[in-house]
Image: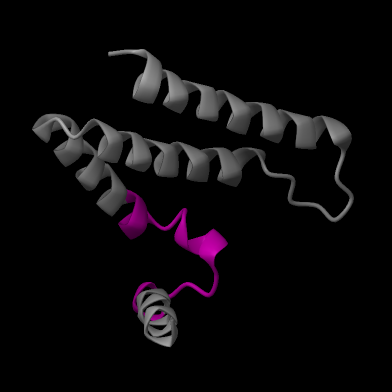
Amino acid sequence: METLANFFDWINNLLGVSSGTELIVHPVFLGFCVIVFLYAVVSGQKFMALAFFGLLAGSIIYHYLYPKSATVELYDLLTFLAAMGGLVLVIIYFGFIRE
């Protein structure tokens, strides 16, 4: 486990970020995810494409809708939870219901 932690620390140092919340909105990380997502779509790997779509969409939802202030309004939290729930439903629909 320590080797894996060192690997993620190396990635954070390479990109110049200090936390995971900064990493998910870093342009290099998002660009890598888009490239892997497009490769998965073109090569027909449905579940890999859904995983990277969920990662991209989740990071965008987190960046724009997660409450940033110390005093969290209930409306802001419910908006964030509804958006994440909608994302989960879309992923379930494309992954398991739609052929």
Residue 13, above or below 35: below
Quadrant the N terminus occupies: bottom left
Q: Position of residue 38 (x, y in %)?
A: 19, 37
Q: Quadrant of the C terminus?
A: top left
Residue closest to the far left:
43
Q: Relative to 84, is 8 on the left or the right? A: left
**Magenta stretch: residue 24 in it?**
yes
Q: Is residue 1 above or below residue 97?
A: below
Residue ID at (69%, 33%): 81
Between residue 43 and residue 30, name the one nearer to us: 43
Left or right: 20 in relation to 55? right
Magenta stretch bounds: 13-30
Q: Is residue 20 magenta?
A: yes
| Side of 84 relative to 14 (left or right) | right
The image position of residue 98, as x and y in percent, is: 34, 13
Q: Main secondary structure of the magenta part?
A: helix
Above or below, 23 relative to 31? below
Q: What is the quadrant of residue 82 in the picture?
A: top right
Q: Residue at x 18, y 38 (%)?
A: 40
